[in-house]
Image (tube, helix red, strand yellow):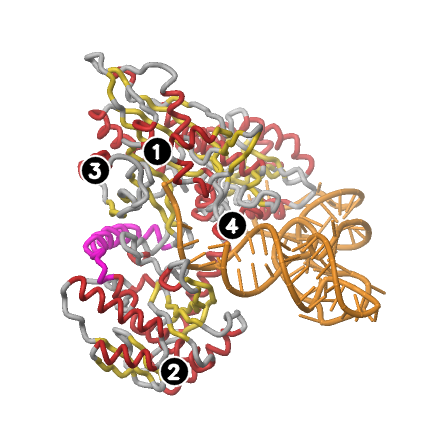
Amino acid sequence: MNRSGRRPLARHTSAPPSIGVGEGRWDRGSRPLVQPWDERFRDSREDLMVEDEQAIEVEEALPDAPERREADELMDHGAAGELGPMRHSAAHVLAEAVLDLFPGTKLGIGPVIDDGFYYDFLLPRPLTPEDLPAIEARMRESIAADHPFEFSEETPEAARAALVERDQPFKVEIVDDLAAAAERDGTPMPPTTFYRQGPFIDLCRGPHVASTGKIGPFKLLGTAGAYWRGDEKRPMLQRVYGTAWATQEELDLYLERRDQAKKRDHRRLGVALDLYSFHDVSPGSAFWHPKGQRIWRTLESSMRELQERRGYQEVSTPILVSERLWRQSGHWDHYAENMFIVESEKQLFSLKPMNCPESTIIYRSKLRSYRDLPLRFSEFGRLHRNERSGTLSGLTRVRQFIQDDAHVYVRPDQLADELEAMLDEVKEAYSWFGLTPRFAFATKPDKAIGDPALWERAEELIHATLMRTGVEFVTKPKDGTFYAPKIDIYIDDALGREWQMATIQCDLVMLPERFDLTYIDEAGQPQRPIAIHRAIYGSLERFIGILVEHFAGAFPVWLAPVQAVVVPIADRHLDAAEEFAGVLRSRGLRVEVDGSSNRMQYKIRTAQEQKVPYMVVLGDREIEARTASPRTRAGEQQDPQPWDEFADRLAEETRARTVV
RNA sequence: GCCGACAUAGCUCAGUGGUAGAGCAGCUGUUUCGUAAACAGCAGGUCCUCGGUUCAAAUCCGAGUGUCGGCUCCA
């Protein structure tokens, strides 16, 4: 079974093109295909859940073995549903067109991806968006000619010779690698296959449609630079992305959905809703406006409430810290390229990129007893990481951010329970937003510090806990931090991108060993605790950015920066409007009165555009009865109700943190 | 960091070598209105920065910065 066993719903995904099929990664296509904000969601939710579980099962059954990657490079993406062969065929036609327009082009690879395909080329000059129409036109000619796809099989030697002859060094490399892999594994080299359509022939394993005329409506979406084989030390090729569908309607729907996704982009909505902004005086760092800060503080206080209930103690540590600490922790050797270094009076300092090492200073401030553990220190720490400029993106990839971080020190016998409690914390917190977390187990990376035996033990402990709790998870080999294996928690944003949110790291190495942490056991002997690093929101910045897209700016009542706008119909209703707002504010609700001289319709439109959950109209009728007429942002007009009743209801929705 | 594109009013954008524009937002006045846009007027610019070409540059060229689409990276 491959990933093609999906329903036609796949055509509704709005995921951007992505290769997304590395080892240990989720295949994007296997994730829920309808997002919670879709109208269809309510009706189809159950189906989707089942589908998702099946998908996970399927994905886990897929090998991470080298042959799969080789297959990817040979474009064997029969995986991508019934549209797969057609899209892959479109990639061939794309290559044919480019080779025709730019003689001498060296071909890279041309796989199928979510919703489309791409092909990589080494060209005499970079492509620009203006080149795409000409390429599309040439593609249409090939499609109109309806060339059959002809299959042929060669011995590896003959194939190699043919590719050398055609001066296609990247293809030669692929054949050589296949041969090397076969030799390494002691398996016979499979015959090498080619497909020809019209004048164009390409090394490929297929499958294809019967002829170019079977290729449906398509559109080239853009160009980008991409390193050959994803290696930044190798040449940068020109990648052309495209999409193709069975019918024009589906293509139009896909393009329309792409536009819709842009409209909920958190960078756009942040400006429209006056939440935050960015300025070139501090690239990669957000300026938080009052309404954005309001959301921030609501998230923060919710997490504080959870943490206090669950036995955490909040601490705060300095941002500017001597290199001595970072040398001791290993960051200076393993993370320096991401640290902002500051010099003062011949001493080097760094803006902290993580809170953990400083947490140990508090741990070590006194002698700890086995009775003190678990010791749970939480910290909303402000971190700086010097991310490469090209990677910055809105709130989702920033240089300065605040984590809802915590470091929990446990005895070995307490670890399993504590990890389980943390998984539960994650589920609780995510339920406030209607988000469903997915779990991944990330193991020891190549660049790791500490005793391998400790790593092995930490990985065993995490794995055992995951198995015991019965949560679904995938394994991401070598994706751990340099000091700990971890459980990462992922969700998808509105554009179908996968985001790591929470992380739970089981550290037997950095904090315990490098900082020589101890507690005194029952026998009076010093023992080594285990340190668990965890963050539930992850970065507050990234979390808010994803929430903006998740809700398209229409935050649930409990989180909305303005929960209700009071709309007096005429000036004579202003005093009563203020009085009513006072009733709401006295219950801690966030309310604005629109006292402008605009007409009521205009005030409602404004509140609607700001995605305020409730608009409450006050006119002669309401004031006389001391009632309010709420209208929801969904357009539902509710019956007039007494002021206190409405206030109580809103307060209860806020307290319960209900979504919708 | 790499490849490409882009940068004009608070926002969205028009303006391809000859006096800087529109809509929305803002301000002022009129209007006091029953569930998604009342009317009129006014104001608003280092055309990202620096340098070059030219009689003349928002416009052409170069460098820098930032942003966007990707690649790489993501403890």
| Residue A469 visible somewhere in the drawing | no
| Residue type pointed to by label 1 | Arg
Q: Is residue A185 above or below residue A123?
A: above
Quadrant in the picture for residue A511? top left
Q: What type of secondary structure mainly makes up the magenta span?
A: helix
Q: Residues within 10 Å of mark 3 (few under 14, many from 20)?
A: some
At label 2, the amino acid type is: Ile
Chain that bears disc 4: A
Residue A105's disc number:
none
Q: CA distance from mark 1 to mark 4?
A: 27 Å
Range drawn in magenta = A40-68
Left or right: A328 in relation to A58: right
Which mark is on residue A534? 1
Three-letter residue code for mark 4: Ser
Q: Closer to the N terminus: mark 4 or mark 3? A: 4
- Between disc 2 and disc 3, the foreground one is 3
Q: Foreground mark, 3 or 1?
A: 3
Residue A567 sits above or below residue A367 on the image: below
